[in-house]
Amino acid sequence: MKYSASYSKEKFANFSFDAQLKALSKLLQALEEQIAAPDTYPRILDQIKELSRMCREPLPPRLATAIDGLSMDPYRSLRALAQYFGEATYKDNQIALRTGDGLKDASQDDLLRAGQLTVIADNLRSVFNVGSLFRLCECLRINELILCGISPDPSHPNMAKTALGTCDKVPWRKVESSTEAIAELKAKGRTIYALETAEPSKSAFETEFAFPLALLLGNEALGIPESTLAQCDSIIHLPVLGWKNSLNVAVAASIATYHIMFGA
């Protein structure tokens, strides 16, 4: 698979120091673009490591820290790349939605189910997706939204726009890792369902859900690590009929959560 930057050692050696820094930054961007490509990712990573040692001068601390944080394990590289690039590269939808016009006669059974449902966001990269999860959780009065790893929280400067004012209406908290959050929730008696296309998984529409429960969502490009899936009680997926094997994570979460609440 082609990616946006590639440099031979000879070409890189002839660059000025400023040009070398720009080249490394482009390679870091290419690494994030190809983070889920098992053939391309190692090649870009090796090139970054090799070329960084050829620079004419010591690297700026921010760039050096990012490169030092890279690993053959793409899940470990996510944090370094997120810290280096700062805000997500995704554009936030600047849309105005109606508020306060939902049904207010929810049944006690519905409210009881919502109070027994937790959503876990595991290393989501996009503030737009996390903002959409806040809106989902507010609409359904979900018990809690847990943000793990690099998932942006309401302190992000773009969260207020993407969440459309729902951040202060949803119980949420940050947890360093999803494995920590899962262990805590299981100790409290919650059944953990991972929404993932990994095998073996069962269609969400053929699953009998056990309350109280938590729905685990994974990174947009990499999904949920196998070690984390092993902690879960069940893996569920949304069946697809087309070429793509999955939906946008916030869209998939909305479909699954509404089904759990009203369809299952």
Image (spheres, rainbow, N blue to C red):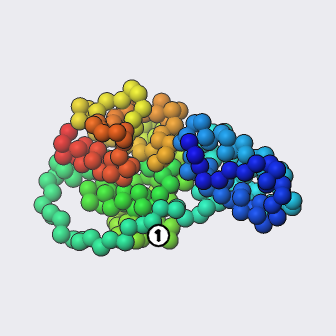
User: Percent from the top left, x then y, of residue 174?
Assistant: 50, 55
Q: Quadrant of the N terminus?
A: top right
Q: Is residue 81 visible?
A: no
Q: Quadrant of the C terminus?
A: top left
Q: Which residue is painted at 76% across and 64% down in the image?
A: 19
* Residue with the mark numbered 1: 158
Judging depth in this view, the residue of 214 and 115 nearest the camera is: 214
Q: Residues within 10 Å of mark 1 (few under 14, many from 20)?
A: some
User: Percent from the top left, x then y, of residue 164?
Assistant: 35, 70
| Residue type, mark 1 in image | Asn
Judging depth in this view, the residue of 35 and 141 nearest the camera is: 35
Judge whether 134 appears above or below 225 on screen.
Answer: below
Q: Is residue 157 visible?
A: yes
User: Percent from the top left, x then y, of residue 154?
Assistant: 46, 66
Judging depth in this view, the residue of 212 and 217 nearest the camera is: 217
Left or right: where does residue 235 sit relative to residue 258?
A: right
Total labels drawn: 1
Label 1: element kind: loop
Q: Which residue is painted at 18% across and 46% down in the image?
A: 262
Q: Which residue is painted at 26% across and 50% down in the image?
A: 114
Residue 59, picture quadrant: bottom right
Left or right: where does residue 154 sit relative to residue 241?
A: right
Q: Which residue is painted at 58% across and 46% down in the image?
A: 2
Left or right: where does residue 113 sit relative to residue 8?
A: left
Residue extending farthest to the right is: 56
User: Percent from the top left, x then y, of residue 247?
Assistant: 35, 46
